[in-house]
Amino acid sequence: MYHFLRAGSVKPAGWLYDQLKIQADGLSGHLHTVWPDVRDSAWIGGSCEGWERVPYWLDGFIPLAYLLDDAEMIADAKRYMEAIIDRQKPDGWICPCSEEERKGYDVWAFFLIGKVLSLYAEFSGDVRAEKALYSAMKCLYGFLARGDVKLFDWGKSRWFECMIPLDYLYERYPEDWIPALAKILREEGLDYHTVKERWVRYSNRWTQETHIVNLMMMLKYEAVTKKLLGTMADYADEAEELWQILERYNGTAVGTFTGDECLAGLNNNRGTELCSVAELMYTCEVLYALTGEPKWADRLERAAFNAFPAAVSDDMWTHQYDQQVNQIACRIFGSKSFFGSNNDEAHLFGLEPHFGCCTANHNQAWPKLAMSIYLERESGVEAALILPSVAETTVNGVPVTITCKTGYPFRFDAEYTVVSAAPVDMELTVRIPSWASDVRAEGAEITGNKAVYKLHADGETTVSLCFKDTPHFTERPCDLSVLEYGPFVFSLPIDTEYVIHEYVRDGVERKAPYCDYELLPKSEWRYGFSGETFTVKEKAGDAVPFSSKAPRLVIEAFMKPVDWDYAEGYDSVADRTPVSHMATGAAVTKELVPYGCAKLRMTEMPKTEE
């Protein structure tokens, strides 16, 4: 079991810094000025939503502010946190509701604000935040132990999320009531093993047991509970069993799962809620840290470098609620929504398409990825993710700075510079992606998927590594294929017209750049692969790492047109499969781009026949 480096000890660099700066300059950094549910929230004394939205937003905004050392954002975070702490009741109750409403209050918000308080306490060092967390969790323990409050709905479905702040507390206050509270939560919470048969067949019905965000959170339940209530030596990897069921019946080509908003089967035109992608990333980060299993880091990269950037605009002022693997248009359906229980605007890019949870919650994805780059190990430090960054830590009491210069995932090499304040023997371990071949790491011992550099660090030491991959097909259902290279799935991009919608609904203004956009196709999308000759081209790109205008990596491929109809009853959704794999024309050369760079795209396509 490893530990992330102390909050604030890792700083983004290179493209990752640029991406976080884009986020700060976009909706995430301005949500508290433009969106009533954060600006005027009951959490800070206002009259708007006082449940999950402010905690969701702060869960990403706080690390974003500190990762960027942005004084104004840090001040805003402090203002919100102090307002929340100031309103905490004498008995520790912290959520904004009256005493009469407590028994019917869904304590999911308690879990969320607990995570936020622990995060803020760690970044800021504010003792008040830690004390507020202690009081809040002890208050929750009293209510649950007496039976005054019961878990239901979201709290019952997401009980394991509370293990995150409880673990933080227990490391600092090893008191019996903390594992006792964890035990109550486990006993009252939903046991997902009893409902896994519901994931096999798409039901087109909204349930907590098939809710995609619940399930992406759920995968870490055994690990976080074992850490608090048992021992990781007894960890049985139940997450893998549940993952395999979910993937077999609801998996997508980009390592996520369909859910619009509940599990939706294997069709490549069904939606995947953005909250589920952000939560999947966090779950994989936690699972890798607690188990050391490389598969979780591989799965994290697949979601982070494909599904997440695909669902946010280049400037990060807008996002989708639902993304589609084969997404030929983001047009208001106008009659019956194509999605299971989401409305006909859920796939638009906007301020709060369909529902505002993703508006607040998607902000955690990039910052928490940056927080998860390095892990402490007994022998030194592990770079769990190859990302441009600077980390400051200590090894055997010696201050050490580790700088990673890399263009990964757009380039397949990295250079690490270790600067020590005094001579120290240490290991720098770099996790190598499972797909990598021809790994070259001079001076390192390659063990499985890890390059271990045994260093006598004295002053400045530099090491490097590189690896390769070859573009290749991965088979998908219905005899379709996707093209992969490195951590990326590649898509055929569709030229796009953006149609702007500025309006006010229910008192919420949509105004550029945080308005709604329909995306309409301006080029042909009905193609299949022709042969397996591919040319990889590295390009300079532009200021946006996952740019839809100037991708940093493309693959030239031969493709042929095929007969492909729309889904029955719709004129803006591609049917799951083409009418035939037979080509209807001659081969043409097309540039395919990383999935996350294509807002309109075809991804699962046939290998054409003559």
Image: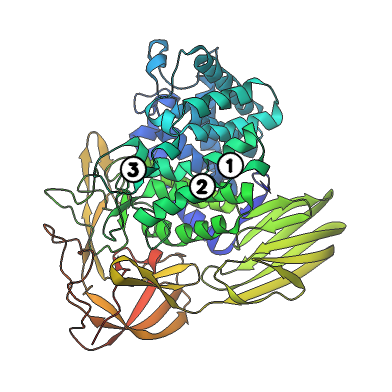
Q: How many marks?
A: 3
Q: Amino acid at mark 1?
A: Ala
Q: What numbered label is drawn on residue 162? A: none
Q: In the picture, residue 490 is in which quadrant? A: bottom left
Mark 2 vs 3, N-terminal side: 3
Q: Residues within 10 Å of mark 3 (few under 14, many from 20)?
A: few
Residue at position x 23%, y 78% from top?
581
Q: Amino acid at mark 2?
A: Ala
Q: Are marks 2 and 1 in contact (CB under 8 Å)?
A: yes
From the image, tell me which residue sits under label 1: 223
Q: Residues within 10 Å of mark 2 (few under 14, many from 20)?
A: some
Badge 2 element: helix
Q: Is residue 534 left or right of residue 179?
A: left
Q: What numbered label is drawn on residue 239? A: 2
Find residue 167 and report its horizontal and vertical position in percent: 63, 33
Q: Is residue 530 above or below residue 127?
A: below
- Relative depth, front residue between 577 and 492: 577
Q: Amino acid at mark 3?
A: Arg
Badge 3 element: helix
Q: Is residue 283 above or below residue 411?
A: above
- Relative depth, front residue between 408 and 65: 408
| Res 493 seen here | no
Find residue 101 and report its horizontal and vertical position in percent: 38, 14
From the image, tell me which residue sits under label 3: 198
Residue at position x 52%, y 36% from top?
77
Badge 1 element: helix
| Res 264 seen here | yes
